[in-house]
């Protein structure tokens, strides 16, 4: 199996308040079959054996691209320049021998660094708490055909619901705007009959919370769409803009 | 009443609300450009046509028309600038810089909006002093007799022409991103319309660019009007 010798430039930061810095590591004899996270596991194993330095801290969970936990900016692009994948789905065969790889956390003031590459993305949870849900009686799931939903609406809602809330959109945006995330979460429910009752409340609440968390303002550059591991379209942002305008208008006269 | 004014405040403070204000004032300015260009191109129709047009603008609604337009434009222009500067300042302070910064697909013109915009602001100030206030005594005197002649004389100066071309290049870049952004911000862009909107934006920017620079270039380089 071919092996790679790489140079890593990794962001190391003790804790939320300390200053971080870029450290250089030699990652020797990395198998091309390893995933990107496995490559860091190998480097960490050597760091631990070596005993000189703490291993590199990073977020990860499912390692199959559905949990939205892994969060690294690789050579300046969240989840790397490969389209439609999370960091855990990235393989070392995409890199070449002798390459230098820059690894940084998802950067945004609304995602403060906890340690090294680990960031606190609970601002997303608070946005969901501000309206990204429907109020229903809990219990057994209703029959799938109980409420008829036009196919295009069901498809649009499903595409939006693919968002795993990883935060790559924020990390890629030149303004650290959370519009793709918020629009996907709002669009998912706003496309469905079950979401109509609380639609205005949802849109106003989520956008209000988004602004409060210190995310930037969208400038329609669509960097978010390019890095989204679930390839969520910025059409949802247009819908959120439209829904926000309508909700504000209705809110001002009611 | 208080509830309604309060939701308007919330709207004008929110990120989307402020962007919609920028889009609407931008739309007004974009439409103004089309009118302004069509009027200006009358310069090629000859001295009489152009001077009649200038006379019409100044006497429309007994002279009130031009002031209504000026106040409306000034309002849109100032609002557009104030809100974009506020948004840009906010956007610049939303994160610590990446050590390795990469751009995937954001266009150059989208990244230079504030700089193209501020250059256009400087140009508009110059342009108004040049042709509306007429700080130059010679041009002012000519303007009273024949606005057509005033334009021909003004564009004999290569420095003026260079500044006009630079400003129009910035305007072209600004419109290339701006026109398409109006549709997105007002929520009118969908999968189906994304392509045509992109095309319209680029095409509109190109027409405005060629239209406006054709006048000073024809006068300076090809001796039009001489």
Image (tube, rainbow, N blue to C red):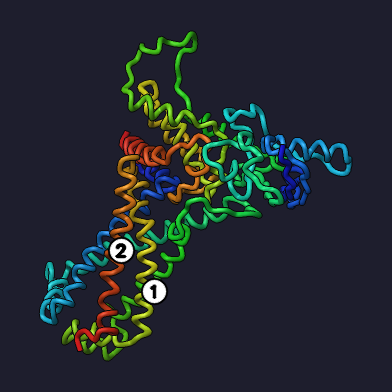
Please tell me which residue is depicted at 46% across the width and 28% down the height of the picture.
A161
Figure check: A156 above or below A31? above
Q: Answer with left or right where residue B161 lies relative to residue A64.
A: left
Residue B68 visible somewhere in the drawing: no
Tags 1 and 2 touching, CB below 8 Å: no
Q: Using the image as rendered, state which of residue A116 and residue A245 is in the foreground.
A: A116
Q: How crowded is mark 2: few (under 14 residues within 10 Å), some or many (20 or more)?
A: some
Q: What element carries label 1?
A: helix
Q: Answer with left or right where residue B88 lies relative to residue A111.
A: left
Quadrant of the image occupied by residue B159: bottom left
Q: Which residue lies furthest to the front in this view?
A: A1
Q: Residues within 10 Å of mark 1 (few under 14, many from 20)?
A: some
Q: Using the image as rendered, state which of residue A104 and residue B47 is in the foreground.
A: A104
Is the C terminus of chain B in the top left, top right, bottom left or bottom right quadrant?
A: bottom left
Figure check: A73 above or below B48? above
Figure check: B174 above or below B224? above
Please tell me which residue is depicted at 62% across the width and 46% down the height of the picture.
A107
Return the mark for residue B166: 1
Q: Using the image as rendered, state which of residue A63 and residue B54 is in the foreground.
A: A63
Return the mark for residue B206: 2
* Labels in figure, total: 2
């Amino acid at each position: 199996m071919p092996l790679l010798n790489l140079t890593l430039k990794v962001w190391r930061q003790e804790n939320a308040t300390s200053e971080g810095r870029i450290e250089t590591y030699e990652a020797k004899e990395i198998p091309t079959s390893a995933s990107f996270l496995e490559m860091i596991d190998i480097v960490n194993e050597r760091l631990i054996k070596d005993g000189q330095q703490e291993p590199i801290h990073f977020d990860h969970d499912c390692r199959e691209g559905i949990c939205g936990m892994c969060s690294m900016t690789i050579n300046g692009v969240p989840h790397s320049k490969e389209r439609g994948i999370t960091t855990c789905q990235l393989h070392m065969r995409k890199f070449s021998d002798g390459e230098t790889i820059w690894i940084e956390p998802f950067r945004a003031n609304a995602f403060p660094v906890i340690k090294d590459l680990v960031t606190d993305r609970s601002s997303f949870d608070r946005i969901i708490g501000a309206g990204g849900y429907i109020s229903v009686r809990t219990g057994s799931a209703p029959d799938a055909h109980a409420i008829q939903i036009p196919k295009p609406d069901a498809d649009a809602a499903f595409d939006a619901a693919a968002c795993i809330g990883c935060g790559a959109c924020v990390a890629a945006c030149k303004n650290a705007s959370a519009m793709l995330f918020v629009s996907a979460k709002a669009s998912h429910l706003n496309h469905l009959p079950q979401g109509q009752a609380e639609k205005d409340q949802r849109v106003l609440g989520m956008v209000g919370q988004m602004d409060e968390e210190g995310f930037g303002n969208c400038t329609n550059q669509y960097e978010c769409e390019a890095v989204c591991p679930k390839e969520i379209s910025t059409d949802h942002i247009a819908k959120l803009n439209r829904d926000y305008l309508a909700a504000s208008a209705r809110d001002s006269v009611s | 009443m208080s509830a309604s004014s309060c939701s308007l405040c919330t709207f004008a403070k929110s990120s989307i609300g402020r962007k919609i204000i920028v889009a609407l004032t931008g739309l007004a300015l974009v439409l103004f450009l089309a009118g302004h260009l069509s009027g200006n191109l009358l310069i090629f129709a000859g001295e009489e046509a152009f001077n009649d047009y200038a006379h019409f603008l100044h006497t429309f609604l007994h002279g009130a028309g031009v002031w209504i337009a000026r106040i409306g434009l000034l309002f849109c222009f100032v609002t557009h600038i104030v809100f974009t500067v506020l948004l840009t300042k906010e956007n610049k302070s939303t994160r610590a810089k990446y050590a390795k910064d990469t751009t995937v697909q954001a266009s150059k013109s989208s990244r230079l909006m504030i700089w193209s915009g501020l250059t256009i602001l400087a140009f508009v100030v110059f342009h108004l002093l040049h042709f509306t206030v007429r700080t130059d005594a010679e041009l002012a005197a000519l303007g009273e007799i024949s606005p057509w002649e005033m334009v021909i004389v003004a564009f004999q100066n290569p420095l003026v022409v260079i500044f006009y071309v630079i400003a129009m290049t910035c305007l072209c870049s600004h419109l290339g991103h701006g026109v398409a952004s109006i549709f997105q911000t007002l929520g009118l862009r969908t999968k189906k319309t994304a392509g045509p909107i992109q095309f319209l934006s680029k095409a509109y920017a190109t027409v405005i660019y060629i239209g406006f620079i054709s006048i000073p270039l024809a006068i300076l380089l090809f001796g039009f009007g001489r």
